[in-house]
Image (cartoon, rainbow, N blue to C red):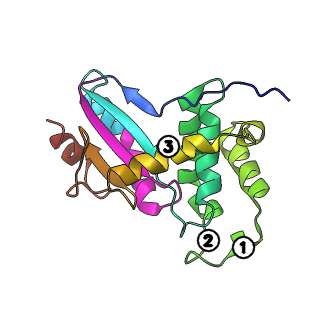
Amino acid sequence: MATTPWQADPLTWGHGPRVFEVFLEPTCPFSVRAFNKLDDLLALAGEERITLKVRLQSQPWHLFSGVIVRCVLAASTLPGGKANAKAVLAAVAAHREEFEFTHHASGPNMDATPNDIIARLEHYSGVKLAEAFAIPDLDRETKWHCKYARQNGIHASPTFMVDGLVQGDISSGDTVEQWLAHLQ
């Protein structure tokens, strides 16, 4: 059986010399808070001044984390690439409770299956994910994100890097202007 070649579109926006990387777990409330500020950061800083890179940081205590991260990466392989991935991230951010467990171990999602999660993401994002989710070696992209995070000493989300250096003093609770000050 022949496999169709695929490529994940890098989750990168802007093309400036300062590189701002943010490691996100899509269902983490703090990652959602950070994700919701990224467009404002890019607009305020200017695409010619910074390069914004989203890295996915799957975390096992967010029980559907692996499924959702795979959905984001699957979306990036479709026509529209990173715009699709961003739409999936935005869908999770806007409907986080439908993708997370109560206290990480209970609640209505106890009866949800991965197919239910994929269907919800398709509904909220408008991105048809099921076929791309099934790409046999899509896990290589997930593994790349995991390996990159580990190599940089990142174990939790959100974590921020500026020009390749982890910035422990940047928080999802900071304003966009505070983030921008780290990029000056």
Residue at the location (17% across, 43% down)?
182
Q: What amino acid is at disc 2?
A: Phe
At mark 1, the secondary structure is: helix
**Which residue appears at 50% of the width and 43% of the height?**
144
Q: Which residue sits at x=40%, y=60%?
A: 30
Counting labels gives 3
Residue 4 in the magenta stretch? The answer is no
Q: Is residue 143 above or below residue 104?
A: above
Q: Residues within 10 Å of mark 3 (few under 14, many from 20)?
A: few
Q: Is residue 27 magenta?
A: yes
Q: Is residue 56 left or right of residue 85?
A: left
Label located before the other in sequence (1 or 3): 1
Identify residue for label 3. 144
Give the number of the mark in front: 3 or 2: 3
Horizontal and vertical percent position of residue 100:
60, 65
Marks 1 and 2 in Cβ contact (< 8 Å):
yes
- Say what amino acid the circle numbered 1 marks: Met
Q: Residue at x 40, y 58 (%)?
A: 157
Please identify the residue farthest to the right as the structure is shown: 1
Q: Is residue 34 visible?
A: no
**Image coords of residue 87 (percent x, y):** 58, 38
Which mark is drawn over residue 110?
1
Q: Is residue 142 left or right of residue 78?
A: left
Upstream in the sequence, badge 1 or badge 2? 2
Q: Which residues are magenta?
A: 16-38
The residue lying furthest to the front in this view is 1
x and y, in percent, of residue 158 in the image:
38, 56
Q: Nearer the viewer, residue 164 or 61?
A: 164
Q: Nearer the viewer, mark 1 or mark 3?
A: 3
